[in-house]
């Protein structure tokens, strides 16, 4: 009897000793934040790095350290020496020149768009200990050293400038820059967002030529947003935003010769309805490589331009019946050839061509995708890349010779691994995590020998042990048409298979984007843990259109975004609903951005299986979104009406039976608030009840201060009341 009593008493004690996560833990206290290692500003020798040190009396110094041992070698700069006009400049913002004899610093940084910061920049000379200002007046953008370290090119007031660091002179290269009209060397909004690049200028290897792209936005229509700052009248922000089917910037390519201070126009063809997603000098300083993409984004040309004449020759083309993704995989191999990636054999692989565009060999092969080309070590003739060879939920790093031989898996754990190589490929920093393990950072030499653990997040691992965390488990299932999909599930820690649980589904679903990954998911993981502690099962499935399973799987959603993705999520809901421990009458769905779009389709087209849904910052009709992203997958609205209208949530609100919450930031420059306003109008017109929350002035991320805490508090309340 005594033993039985002790056992009965002990079990509750063990259970209740486990703490539960709160929303404050996630969004204000950041109780479970993982750590990253110190930043390694590796120097050009590949063996040392520079970092900031602060003494006990507050003196800041920039020091040189041995990468392997971490020991300080010497002091490079004393912060007391870094000042301009009597004012000290923050030394922690340093960036070395190519020769490491100068550093670039900045202050008063502000972001224009996601990748477009502008600031006041300064250059400090290590030998003379003298600081100069990069430019006076307006703040500058994208300062870029010439390879010889003697000049800096930058953008100011939409014009391109060059600073000569030897005599402190400044040359203005363009004169026609104008707000919302002409941008030189700086991409327009849609290029920056959808081609993931904001600066569009490049130096040749001899520091003589500066190539750049000019964006003429004159015919691009403007979009305006109101900002509410407590004044009598709101501020109005207006910027160029080309929606689907609308005019783009007219782009042109130019090359400036710093010796004779003359500029030439490059011949990129007579068709102006094109994109120039990348420019890059070859290893021959007399040739500029230009990537030219047609409006349909299914034909990518590689042009080589002569820097003196501007004449171009077509070297290579990639064509597709659907679309082509733009990457930064182009790598020139001395003066022999170049490496690119393509889906030529139905999976994304690396290819080696000579400088005339003739295929030398396909480097990687197999029924899996290369997701990232990490670099090429010319000394050992070795390429490094990341792939999905061990399944779409995992990532591994491999090395392979240029001829496709001697492939070796370099990562050694199941999950998501990435390598960042140091200069000269002497070392690499490995970052690894899996679905239930916080990130692990380690330093290895190029032969794969572990040098040291940089950050293991042991404190976080120990802290988690005191909380009622559950394990994320992966599973596969087949849709009615036989398509196998990857998913994960999180059950409450005190899961009882004889009970029936509600299910909270989460997904993104956009083309080429995965959220069903065997990696640490940071705040989303914590949010989902909190839901399991509230008695919910949480599940996520990557449907058709996502990454890592080849071209056919990824491109299957072409021309009909939202169709197969919705079918797959409905199939997932039905699969979960048939599990013996799931209450199929209590299945919900939440998503953000593309996931918010999916949530709106699930509560309408999936009304028979979804009881509750939350859309955060959703697209509600693709005609409201930007043209590069939208036309890549749907073409223009006038050429594919059904693709736009047949999967627009606004057209299917009459099907809604359950509970729906719509959330958006009024200052969203990406997915405009217009989307939610149109959906709300349709819901009201059809007398469909819904909850609506607007976050004033907040952008697509809806963050800042306690905003996320407020947002997730509202979502949790809605879930608990309606699911």
Image: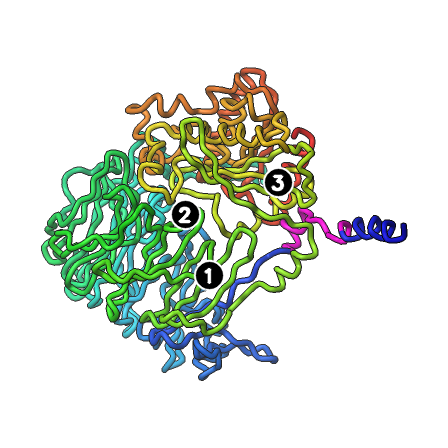
Residue at the disc numbered 3 = 711
Foreground residue, 140 or 519?
519
Residue at the disc numbered 1 = 431
Which numbered disc, 1 or 2, marks the residue closer to the eye? 2
SS state under label 2: loop
SS state under label 1: strand
For the record, the magenta segment spans 15-31
The answer to whether 122 is drawn above or below residue 64 in the figure is above
N-terminal label among 3 and 2: 2
Residue 180: image x %, image y %? 35, 42
Q: Does residue 575 appear left or right of residue 498 in this picture? A: left
Residue 277: image x %, image y %? 27, 47
Gap in angstroms between the C-alphas marked 3 and 2: 34 Å
Gap in angstroms between the C-alphas marked 1 and 3: 31 Å
Q: Please say if the residues under marks 1 and 2 sit with CB atoms less than 8 Å apart.
A: no
Residue 87 visible in this rendered orientation of the protein: no
Of the 4 image quadrants, the one containing the C terminus is top right
Given the current orientation, which residue lies at the most extreme front position? 1
Which numbered disc, 3 or 2, marks the residue closer to the eye? 2
Point 44% across, 57% down: residue: 417
Foreground residue, 342 or 481?
481
């Amino acid at each position: 009897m005594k033993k039985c009593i002790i056992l009965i008493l002990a079990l509750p004690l063990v259970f209740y000793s486990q703490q539960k996560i709160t929303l404050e833990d996630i969004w204000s206290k950041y109780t479970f934040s993982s750590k990253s290692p110190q930043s390694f500003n590796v120097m050009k020798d590949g063996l040392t790095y520079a970092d900031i040190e602060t003494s006990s009396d507050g003196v800041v110094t920039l020091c040189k350290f041995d990468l392997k041992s971490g020991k300080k070698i010497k002091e490079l700069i004393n912060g007391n020496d870094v000042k301009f006009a009597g004012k000290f400049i923050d030394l922690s913002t340093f960036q070395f020149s190519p020769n490491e004899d100068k550093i670039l610093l900045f202050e008063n940084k502000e972001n224009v768009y996601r990748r477009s910061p502008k600031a006041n920049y300064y250059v400090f000379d290590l030998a003379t200990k003298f600081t100069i200002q990069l430019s006076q007046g307006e703040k500058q953008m994208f300062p870029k050293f010439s390879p010889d370290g003697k000049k800096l090119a930058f953008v100011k007031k939409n014009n391109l400038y060059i600073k000569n660091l030897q005599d402190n002179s400044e040359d203005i290269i363009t004169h026609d820059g104008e707000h919302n009209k002409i941008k030189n060397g700086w991409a327009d909004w849609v290029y920056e967002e959808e081609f993931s690049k904001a600066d569009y200028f490049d130096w040749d290897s001899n520091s003589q030529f500066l190539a750049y792209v000019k964006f003429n936005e004159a015919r691009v229509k403007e979009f305006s947003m109101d900002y509410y700052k407590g004044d009598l009248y709101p501020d109005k922000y207006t910027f160029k935003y080309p929606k689907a089917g609308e005019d783009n910037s007219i782009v042109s390519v130019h090359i400036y010769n710093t010796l004779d201070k003359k500029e030439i126009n490059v011949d990129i063809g007579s068709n102006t309805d094109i994109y120039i997603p990348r420019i890059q000098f070859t290893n021959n300083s007399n040739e500029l490589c230009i990537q030219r993409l047609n409006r349909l984004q299914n034909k990518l040309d590689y042009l080589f331009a002569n820097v003196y004449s501007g004449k171009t020759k077509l070297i290579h083309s990639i064509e597709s019946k659907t679309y082509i993704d733009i990457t930064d995989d182009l790598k020139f191999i001395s003066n022999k050839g170049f490496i690119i990636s393509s889906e030529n054999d139905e999976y994304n692989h690396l290819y080696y061509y000579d400088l005339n565009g003739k295929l030398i060999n396909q480097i990687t092969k197999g029924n899996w995708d290369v997701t990232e080309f990490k670099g090429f070590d010319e000394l050992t003739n070795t390429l490094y890349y990341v792939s999905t060879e061990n399944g779409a939920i995992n990532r591994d790093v491999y090395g392979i010779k240029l001829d496709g031989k001697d492939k070796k898996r370099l990562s050694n754990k199941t999950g998501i691994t990435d390598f960042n190589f140091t200069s000269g490929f002497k070392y690499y920093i490995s970052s690894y995590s899996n679905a239930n393990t916080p990130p692990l950072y380690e330093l290895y030499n190029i032969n794969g020998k572990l040098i040291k653990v940089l950050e293991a997040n042991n404190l976080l691992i120990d802290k988690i042990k005191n909380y009622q965390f559950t394990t994320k488990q992966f599973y596969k299932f087949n849709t009615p048409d036989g398509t196998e999909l990857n998913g994960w599930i999180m059950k409450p820690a005190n899961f009882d298979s004889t009970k029936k649980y509600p299910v909270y589904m989460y997904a993104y679903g956009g083309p080429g984007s995965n959220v069903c990954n065997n990696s640490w998911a940071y705040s989303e993981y914590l949010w989902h843990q909190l839901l399991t502690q509230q008695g919910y099962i949480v599940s996520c499935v990557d449907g058709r259109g996502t990454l890592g399973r080849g071209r056919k799987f990824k491109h299957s959603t072409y021309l009909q975004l939202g169709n197969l993705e919705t079918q797959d999520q409905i199939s997932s809901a039905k699969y979960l609903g048939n599990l013996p421990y799931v209450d199929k009458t209590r299945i919900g769905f939440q998503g953000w951005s593309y996931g918010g779009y999916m949530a709106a389709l699930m509560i309408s087209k999936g009304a028979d299986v979804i009881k509750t849904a939350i859309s955060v910052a959703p697209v509600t009709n693709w005609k409201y979104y930007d043209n590069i992203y939208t036309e890549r997958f749907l073409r223009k609205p006038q050429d594919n009406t059904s693709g736009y209208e047949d999967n627009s949530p606004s057209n299917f609100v009459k099907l809604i039976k359950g509970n729906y919450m719509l959330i958006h930031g009024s200052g969203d420059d990406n997915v405009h608030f217009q989307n939610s306003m149109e959906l709300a109008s349709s819901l009201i017109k059809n007398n469909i009840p819904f909850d609506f929350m607007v976050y004033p002035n907040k952008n697509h991320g809806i963050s800042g201060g306690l905003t996320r805490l407020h947002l997730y508090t509202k979502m949790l309340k809605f879930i608990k009341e309606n699911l």
